[in-house]
Image (tube, grey):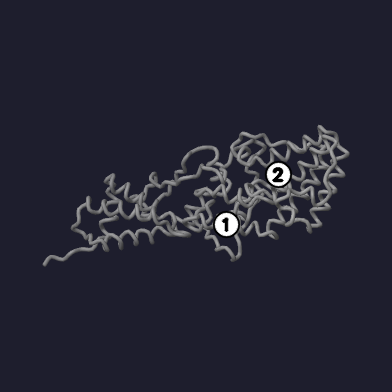
């Protein structure tokens, strides 16, 4: 993705997942130590007890969990707790540092119960207002209100129809992370429903892979410098998109969300002529004409590129600084076709 979400957006609003984890852990640990399990609602963490006392569904699910867990051995209960821990080490899973544990047949009954508990937790995220707070924190953090997974799908403002809150790791496979905001990321509808779909970010053809962490520090950068902007046979660029850093995480992102193909066909090609007109208009507005030197033109192209980079546009125009940078690079490199393309757009000054 092109922008990371703030870590605090997930951490500060993650109390539903945290209290479920604490309640489940308390039940398992008390069973293991032959200690009495507190009655409802005292099985819940004190700081959130008042918010949850009337939640009869979760009460029944935790009671059922206790009834199943008591029939298992201590080793089996600890395996279930280990599975919860591994599925919720989202950063470790995405970085390839944590091994996704397989649900053993002997644990199927307790994992099925945990699935219902954490799915109910996901439902409670909306009822408790946690999803709204989470989305607002992310929306407010974005300098440009667009989906960071593709860069151009516009995000609706808080209070409007909220963007898809996608389970980054599939909730039907990594069931105990269903209510964990570190596994929940707003993304545009096309990114979610048309491209990511039910792809497993951690595996392709049963081969383990790494993926970008939306709440991490690694983000992708796009360059068009290697694009040939014009040839003798074609006046349209043959787009060459370079994504850096060139690591497994960014390659997974590019593949899962079809980044290169979408940017070429949806963003770059349809808007190239408009960018050329904008470059021409800008150079004329700053007073350049056909008599201006190449050095003067280059100076203004650099200024325009920097301005577009500092002031990115929402939607299909967000790559304008990259397109201007491509033109600037080839102009500076004395590409005769690009120099002619830019200079031909400058106005002629008639002799007095």
Residue sitting farthest toward the top: 75
Tell me if mark 1 has few (under 14), some (14-19) or many (20+) residues whose alpha carbon lies within 10 angstroms of its own. Answer: many
Tell me if mark 2 has few (under 14), some (14-19) or many (20+) residues whose alpha carbon lies within 10 angstroms of its own. Answer: many
Residue 89: image location, x then y, percent: 65, 40
From the viewer's perspective, tell me whether residue 351 is left or right of residue 99.
Answer: left
- For the C terminus, the quadrant is bottom left
Identify the residue under disc 2. Answer: 174
For the residue labelled by badge 1, is the local secondary structure a helix, a strand or a loop?
A: loop
Callout in the foreground (2, 1): 2
Is residue 35 or residue 126 the one in the foreground? 35
Is residue 120 or residue 153 the one in the foreground? 120
Dividing the picture into quarters, in which one does residue 176 lie? Answer: top right
Residue lying at 26% horizontally and 58% vertically, measured from the top left = 344
Is residue 210 or residue 235 the one in the foreground? 210
Identify the residue under disc 1. Answer: 188
For the residue labelled by badge 2, is the local secondary structure a helix, a strand or a loop?
A: loop
Residue lying at 38% horizontally and 61% vertically, measured from the top left = 274
């Amino acid at each position: 993705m092109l922008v990371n979400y703030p870590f605090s957006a997930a951490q500060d609003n993650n109390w539903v997942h945290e209290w479920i984890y604490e309640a489940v852990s308390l039940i398992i640990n008390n069973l293991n130590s032959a200690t009495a399990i507190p009655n409802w609602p005292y099985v819940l963490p004190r700081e959130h007890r008042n918010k949850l006392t009337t939640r009869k569904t979760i009460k029944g699910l935790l009671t059922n969990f206790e009834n199943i867990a008591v029939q298992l051995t201590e080793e089996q209960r600890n395996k279930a707790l280990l599975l919860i821990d591994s599925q919720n080490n989202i950063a470790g899973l995405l970085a390839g540092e944590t091994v996704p544990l397989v649900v053993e047949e002997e644990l199927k009954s307790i994992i099925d119960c945990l699935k219902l508990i954490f799915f109910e937790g996901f439902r409670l995220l909306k009822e408790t207002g946690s999803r709204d707070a989470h989305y607002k924190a992310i929306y407010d953090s974005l300098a440009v209100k667009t989906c960071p997974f593709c860069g151009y799908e516009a995000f609706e403002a808080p209070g409007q129809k909220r963007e898809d809150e996608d389970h980054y790791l599939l909730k039907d496979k990594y069931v105990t992370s269903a209510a964990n905001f570190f596994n929940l990321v707003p993304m545009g509808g096309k990114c979610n429903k048309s491209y990511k779909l039910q792809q497993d970010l951690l595996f392709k053809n049963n081969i383990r892979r790494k993926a970008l962490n939306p709440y991490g520090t690694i983000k992708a950068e796009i360059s068009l410098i290697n694009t040939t902007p014009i040839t003798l046979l074609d006046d349209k660029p043959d787009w060459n998109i370079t994504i850096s850093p060139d690591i497994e995480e960014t390659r997974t992102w590019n593949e899962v969300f079809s980044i290169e193909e979408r940017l070429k066909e949806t963003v770059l090609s349809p808007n190239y002529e408009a960018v050329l007109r904008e470059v021409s208009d800008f150079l004329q507005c700053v007073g350049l004409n056909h008599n201006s030197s190449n050095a003067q033109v280059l100076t203004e192209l650099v200024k325009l590129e920097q301005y577009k980079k500092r002031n990115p546009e929402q939607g299909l125009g967000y790559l304008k600084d990259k397109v201007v940078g491509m033109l600037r690079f080839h102009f500076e490199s004395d590409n005769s076709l690009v120099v002619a393309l830019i200079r031909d757009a400058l106005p002629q000054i008639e002799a007095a």
